[in-house]
């Protein structure tokens, strides 16, 4: 039997008064060697359970919350407002611990997923930490402050108020970048 946490998804919804909700979604896969007897003539080959855990939090102002491993900063320079999402992407990032992400568990999930097409589809983001941020105002553009490997590290706008950031876990574990800063420019 093995049990493993599959990546981490962080969803942040900011309200017009800048308060909001932070939700962490964690997928866990548990594989057992024996399942439930279903009848004669059938040989039990195992059981796989996929669980989705949701951890919810509220905040008073998105620039004042200090969860482990990331933080929002807002400032104005030359009459241009900029918001930054600073993420600790070092090997020992406290974000990995907060999301309960374990390198060996991710490897075991990927090994299992390669054997089963249905699991591979379910775990398309197993190798990533994903931030989904909903702003109460339109965003003009988003980008990484420093260059990142295109296709692996992604930041994009899904809508003019929703930003998606994907951080590859293998790059975090390899120590590619200790800090990742996403620049967010409101309209």
Image: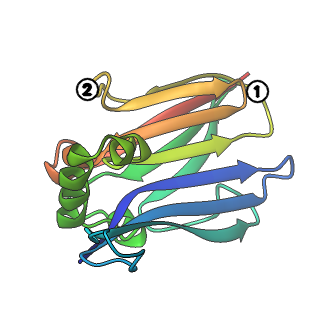
Task: Name the quadrant of the C terminus.
Answer: top right
Q: CA distance from mark 1 to mark 2?
A: 27 Å
Residue drawn at (47%, 30%) of the image: 155
Q: Where on the picture, by quarter, is residue 42?
A: bottom left
Residue drawn at (57%, 48%) of the image: 73
Answer above or below: position of 143 versus 165: above
Q: Where residue 10 sits in the image (x, y, percent)?
A: 54, 54
Q: Where residue 116 sits in the image (x, y, percent)?
A: 28, 46
Task: Name the quadrant of the N terminus.
Answer: bottom left
Residue drawn at (63%, 43%) of the image: 133
Q: Where on the picture, by quarter, is residue 78?
A: top right
Farthest residue, direction right: 17
Q: Residues within 10 Å of mark 2 (few under 14, many from 20)?
A: few
Q: Where residue 65 sits in the image (x, y, percent)?
A: 61, 65
Answer above or below: position of 173 versus 32: above
Q: Which residue has dot 2 on it?
A: 149
Nearer-the-camera pick, 164 or 75:
164
Q: Which residue has dot 1 on it?
A: 138
Contact, mark 1 vs mark 2 (Cβ under 8 Å): no
Farthest residue, direction left: 174
In the image, 10: left or right of 28?
A: right
Upstream in sequence: badge 1 or badge 2? 1
In the image, 113: left or right of 26?
A: left
Q: Residues within 10 Å of mark 1 (few under 14, many from 20)?
A: some
Q: Where residue 96 sits in the image (x, y, percent)?
A: 34, 64
Q: Secondary structure at mark 2?
A: loop
Q: How many marks?
A: 2
Q: Secondary structure at mark 1?
A: loop
């Amino acid at each position: 039997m093995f049990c493993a946490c599959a990546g981490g998804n962080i969803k942040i919804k900011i309200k017009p008064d800048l308060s909001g909700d932070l939700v962490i979604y964690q997928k866990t896969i548990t594989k057992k060697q024996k399942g439930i007897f279903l009848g004669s003539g059938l040989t039990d080959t195992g059981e796989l359970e996929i669980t989705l855990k949701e951890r919810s939090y509220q905040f008073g102002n998105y620039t004042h919350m200090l969860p482990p491993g990331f933080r929002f900063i807002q400032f104005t320079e030359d009459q241009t407002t900029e918001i930054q999402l600073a993420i600790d992407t070092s090997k020992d990032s406290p974000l990995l611990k907060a999301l309960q992400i374990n390198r060996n568990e991710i490897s075991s999930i990927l090994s299992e997923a390669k054997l089963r097409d249905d699991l591979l589809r379910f775990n398309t983001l197993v190798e990533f930490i994903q931030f989904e941020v909903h702003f109460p105002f339109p965003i003009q553009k988003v980008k990484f402050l420093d260059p990142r490997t295109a296709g692996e590290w992604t930041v994009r706008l899904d809508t003019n108020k929703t930003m998606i950031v994907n951080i590859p876990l293998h790059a975090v574990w390899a120590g590619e970048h200790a800090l990742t800063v996403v620049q967010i420019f409101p309209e």
